[in-house]
DNA sequence: ATTCTTGTTATACGAGCGTGTAATTCGAGG
DNA sequence: CCTCGAATTACACGCTCGTATAACAAGAAT
């Protein structure tokens, strides 16, 4: 037998990582139907058979990819809290702005996220992944709200967090799907004003953009 | 040849209608990949070939289905305005509640909507459909806000509409994807409070549920 | 050097996809 | 009642899908 394709052995972690990244790239670019086993393997630089060596089925890979996506989105939002100001209002304001700005808010990210929504509804494992990450995000937000110099009941705190999460998600969605419908900085400004109105504080004045970046 | 399937001739409008409804049903139930030409034809009670007689391609049918879906969602929200109270605040309150309640807010509807998001990003025709319907909804909301007894600038009115639309969309999304995470009536109540806070009015008191229904 | 494990490639299979094209049969107009 | 256009069915084609399985080779162990 002539020329068989040469290859290098890699760690399981590395291979799973590459396959997941390839799958997410393809879904982002061409939707769910573009992420076929052959295309994923090709982009990851391996042959299709290898996918079934690391994932029991394509569905298994899909779940892993969704898990990774949600992790990335939550951590991108949380990143802004590290090294930021200490003031509670400023921290909340920065978090709100980051959540409706790039890279969290991004046409590709929304398309990617939407591709999995149907499965979240129908697949229990997918729903668990979603629930955990949704609550993680909301609790992060609730923690920031709780740190504000106000005194409200626990029930009120929960309602405030849901409401603020709602307006952030809604603006994230609209700004990402239809970016050309809004002027530059319009969505972040509206997000600050709205969250401020819901919590009855002046978030616009509290916003402290990161001056360590150009 | 023996037994060929009997059939009745129907109007073009009726056939297109049935095929679109069948496609939407299938996407809602099993995602985009479940809406194959064969499955659509089967559900519509015809044979696959007929689809290409009324639509130039499957993509053409997909666009028509998305158009129909968006129409339905907007008109479901608008329906609450007909025959409702005359008071501007009450009209807005009812509209807000309807937008985050069944049938507008519904797990199936969200799954259906999400299935098309990727195409909206990549297909110009799909994006046009989306833009038109998004703006129609937002303008309807803006009209309700403009009718309130307040005096604000046009720019402020636009910002208010975007913000209210954002919180409505966000709550619609979260309540529909994860209904079990909220208690009964929690989402509508939060929607009223939030929109009221953004507009600085008491929407909760203004809400007048339709008493003609049981 | 040689062996052995197993990560990796190669290849095949059946099912289902969207799409063309020809054969039928419905039902309206004469 | 007959005719005839066209709505509808029937069928085949080429392709791609996810999966199964066998052959191979890389690299650590000896």
Image: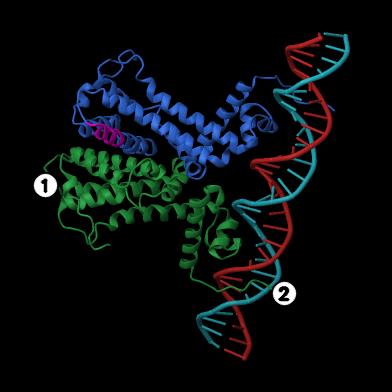
Chain colours: A blue, B green, C cyan, D red
| B147, C27: nearer the viewer | B147
- For the residues beneath circles 1 and 2, the answer to whether they share a chain is yes
Image coordinates of residue B176 in percent, x first then y, are 39, 45
Give yes or no for contact between labels 1 and 2 (Cβ–Cβ under 8 Å): no
- At mark 2, the secondary structure is loop
| A201, A98: nearer the viewer | A201
Residue at image x 29%, y 44%?
B186
| A23, C19: nearer the viewer | A23
Q: Is residue A139 above or below residue B89?
A: above
Image coordinates of residue C26 in percent, x first then y, are 58, 77
Q: Which residue is mark 1?
A: B149
Image coordinates of residue A177 in percent, x first then y, are 39, 38
Q: Which of the marked residues, 1 or 2, is nearer the chain's N terminus?
A: 2
Name the chain under label 1. B
Give the quarter of the image for residue A154.
top left
Image quarter hosting the N terminus of chain B: bottom right
Magenta stretch containing residue A163, yes or no? yes
Q: Which residue is mark 2?
A: B2
Residue, far front: A154
Magenta stretch containing residue B131, yes or no? no
Q: Is residue D23 left or right of residue A156?
A: right
Residue B136 visible to the viewer: no
Residue at image x 19%, y 25%?
A150
Q: CA distance from mark 1 to mark 2?
A: 74 Å
Magenta-colored span: A153-164
Which labelled disc corresponds to residue B35? Answer: none
Q: Main secondary structure of the magenta part?
A: helix
Residue at image x 39%, y 50%?
B106
Image quarter hosting the C terminus of chain B: bottom left
Q: Is residue A137 above or below residue B146?
A: above
């Amino acid at each position: 037998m002539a020329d068989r394709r040469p290859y290098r052995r890699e760690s399981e972690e590395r291979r799973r990582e590459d396959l997941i990244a390839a799958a997410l790239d393809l879904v982002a670019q061409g939707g769910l139907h573009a992420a076929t086993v052959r295309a994923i393997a090709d982009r990851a630089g391996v042959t299709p058979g290898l996918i079934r060596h690391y994932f029991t089925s394509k569905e298994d890979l899909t779940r892993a990819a969704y898990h990774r996506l949600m992790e990335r989105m939550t951590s991108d939002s949380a990143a802004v809290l590290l090294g930021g100001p200490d003031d509670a209002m400023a921290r909340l304001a920065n978090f709100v702005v980051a959540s409706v700005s790039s890279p969290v808010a991004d046409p590709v990210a929304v398309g990617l996220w939407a591709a999995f929504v149907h499965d979240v509804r129908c697949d229990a494992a997918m729903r668990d992944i979603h629930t955990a990450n949704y609550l993680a995000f909301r609790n992060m937000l609730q923690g920031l709200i709780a740190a504000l110099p106000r005194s409200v009941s626990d029930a009120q705190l929960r309602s405030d967090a849901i409401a603020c999460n709602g307006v952030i998600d809604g603006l994230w969605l609209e700004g990402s799907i239809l970016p050309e419908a809004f002027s530059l900085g319009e969505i972040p400004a509206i997000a600050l004003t709205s969250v401020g109105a819901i919590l009855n504080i002046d978030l616009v004045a509290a916003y402290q953009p990161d001056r360590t970046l150009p």
